[in-house]
Amino acid sequence: MKIAIVTNFLYPEALGGTEVYCFQLANALIKNGHEVYWFVPNFKKTTTASEERGDGIKIIRFAAVDDSLVPKLDFTIASFIKEIKARNIEAAHFNEFGGDDGISSTLLGAAKNAGVATIVTLHVITSMCHTGTLHFGGKQVCNGKMILGRCTSCHLFSNKTSFPTVNLVLAQSFYNLLKIKSVRSIPKLKRFMSGMDQRSTFIKALKENADVIVSLSRSFREVLLVNGIPEKKIHLISQVSPGVVDSITSNKTEKRKHYVFFGRVHQTKGIDLLLKMASKLKQDLPGVVIDLYGPNYGSYVFKQVEGLDFAVLGKFDNIRYRGILKPEEVLPIMNNYKAVILPSLIAEMAPLIIMEANQLKVPVIVSDVPGSVELVKKYDCGVVFKYGSADDLLKRIEGVENDRYTFSFKQPVENDFYFTAKKYETIYKSYLAN
């Protein structure tokens, strides 16, 4: 079978969970005897470029702009479909959307019209929720249903101040105002709401043009359902661990020290919560540190410590920035820590890092966002703290440090991408038969 995996970016040029997932899936599909092409836009380029990686993945960077160098949807569609047809692609597997000259839902429709089986796996909640938090006003749990006025109010006010309760009141008040037609007709607000309405358009495109939508978690399946995606279109393929974990010997608990964060160093990932509790952490647990690994996408200032290979985050010498890791370094380094902290404010879909930590028997401390909580409870591999609460996060760290918790680290029976690939094969074949 000829399969196209479609994303905006390519592993290892980008190291997000989506790219790692697609890379693992592509390798497994190739081992199962399929021909796999990885389609990404050739951003700002007028020509298509192709290459083949040593692992057998055929990379297609399709031309994204014409000679004017200005993104034009018609050109991008024509370029994408030309390359799809030239390689006789049978199934197009979309894993990412976004960008004027990137992967848009219109490309999904074009693939469908070209007679290709269309499969969509959504890896981030921002496809449905603009803030990505599934918390109205940044505080009140939301079911993810797209309601234009409510989503607009949430987007405008969820981060308006540093006080979550104030943000919630502002969002609720503005939502009530938006129910008045004259308010909704204000030109600037009307334009803003028109932009917000793009998510409704995206949901409509999924309904019409995706043969099947894969959810990585049961919680996100509920978000899809509440937004009107037909149940028969939704398939659940639970998150698994990359096989590379099997090659690492798990450290004994007594050899592990300190705590670690992997990911984008950004407010949405909960870094501000670490700063809020830093002083109390030093007071209650002197000598305990939290190391951060990942690109700095926030406005955080790091101060280099002379003679050492890390920097401290501002005045907090117990929050240490260790830089960006190569992909092969993540798991061996994780193996040295007492726990992984995922304090995210955004609703994580189904973090790969939890599955990797579970297989290494490193517990995770996660905020109570749906995907993370689902994995932690299912595999008994960590503890959950209250969303947005630095105080509750500190209590969980103290609990792990003082060995108050025990974990079973349950392992799924089908815990690698070979099984995931077999599940996708069944989906591809069933829709090709139609």
Image (tube, rainbow, N blue to C red):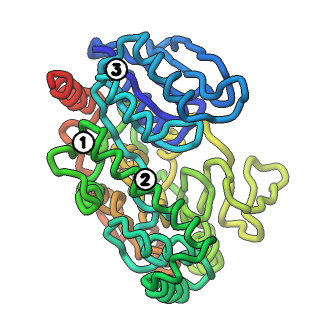
> Which element carries disc 1, helix, strand or loop?
loop
Specify few, some or many for label 1: CA neighbours under 10 Å numbering under 14, 14-19, or 20 or more.
some
Q: Decide: is 425 above or below 108.
A: above
Q: Are marks 2 and 3 in contact (CB under 8 Å)?
A: no
Name the residue at 34% across, 41% down: 121
Judge whether 240 appears above or below 395 on screen: above
The answer to whether one can see residue 25 in this image is yes
Image quadrant assignment for residue 24: top left
Q: Identify the secondary structure beneath mark 3.
A: strand
Q: Residue at x 34, y 23 (%)?
A: 114
Q: Secondary structure at mark 2?
A: helix
Q: Which label sits in the foreground, 1 or 2?
A: 2
Q: Distance of mark 2 from mark 3, alpha carbons? A: 23 Å
Q: Earlier in the sequence, mark 1 or mark 2?
A: 2
Q: Which mark is residue 237?
A: 1
The structure residue drawn at horizontal position 42% and vertical position 64%, both measured from the top left corner, is 366
Q: Amino acid at mark 2?
A: Ser
Question: Label 3 to label 1, Cα distance in Å?
Answer: 18 Å
Q: Which mark is residue 127?
A: 2
Q: Which residue is mark 3?
A: 3
Q: Which residue in the rendered view is the most extreme toward the right?
A: 306
Q: Which amino acid lies under the numbered mark 1 shown in the image of this protein?
A: Ile
Q: Position of residue 22 (x, y in %)?
A: 41, 32
| Residue 360 tag number | none
Number of callouts: 3
